[in-house]
């Protein structure tokens, strides 16, 4: 992690955790390996050629090593693109209690809490 990454991460209200194993996020037009996740959002690496920040209605989260799959609403996205792949950051929309429970399960079981 670079000094810039540490400064950026330190400003977050909710800590993001690195994902263990093979987890992906995908929408109807994009997908990629999840880099980190929190209760309010995640970031993933995308090879999607359009560098614009699109906002799908929902995003699926899948962890292939543990047969985990869930769908979360999306509020907004942003893109940090220098070269492909680019980093896409996603803020979740309002989660139901069931979705929040599943997300907490994912964070507790499939991330490097630290």
Image: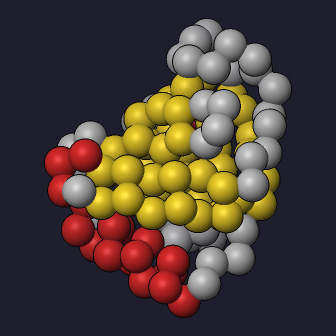
What residue sits 35% from the left and 67% below the top? 107
Q: Nearer the viewer, residue 51 or 17?
A: 51
Residue 4 occupies quadrant: top right
Residue 105 vs 98, above or below: the answer is above
Q: Position of residue 68 (x, y in %)?
A: 30, 60
Residue 9 visible to the viewer:
no
The quarter of the displayed image where residue 47 is located: top right
Residue 69 position in % (x across, y down): 38, 59
Tell me the quarter of the image containing the C terminus: bottom left
| Quadrant assignment, res 51 | top right
Q: Residue at x 61, y 10 (%)?
A: 83
Which residue is outermost to the front?
A: 28
**Nearer-the-camera pick, 37 or 96:** 96
x and y percentages locating residue 22 in the rendered image = 26, 40
Q: Where is 56 relative to 107, above or below?
A: above
Q: Residue furthest bottom?
A: 97
Residue 2 appears in the rendering? yes
Q: Residue at x 75, y 55 (%)?
A: 57
- In the image, 64 versus 110, the foreground residue is 64
Task: Judge whether 61 appears above or below 23 on screen.
Answer: below
């Amino acid at each position: 992690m670079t000094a810039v990454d540490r400064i950026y991460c330190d400003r977050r209200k909710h800590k993001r955790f690195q994902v263990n194993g093979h987890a992906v996020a995908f929408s109807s037009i994009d997908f990629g390996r999840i880099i980190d996740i929190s209760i309010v959002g995640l970031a993933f690496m995308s090879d999607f050629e359009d560098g614009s920040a699109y906002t799908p209605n929902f995003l699926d989260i899948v962890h292939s090593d543990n047969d985990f799959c869930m769908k979360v609403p999306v509020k907004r996205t942003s893109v940090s693109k220098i070269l492909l792949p680019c980093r896409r950051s996603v803020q979740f929309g309002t989660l139901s209690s069931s979705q929040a429970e599943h997300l907490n399960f994912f964070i507790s079981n499939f991330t490097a809490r630290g």
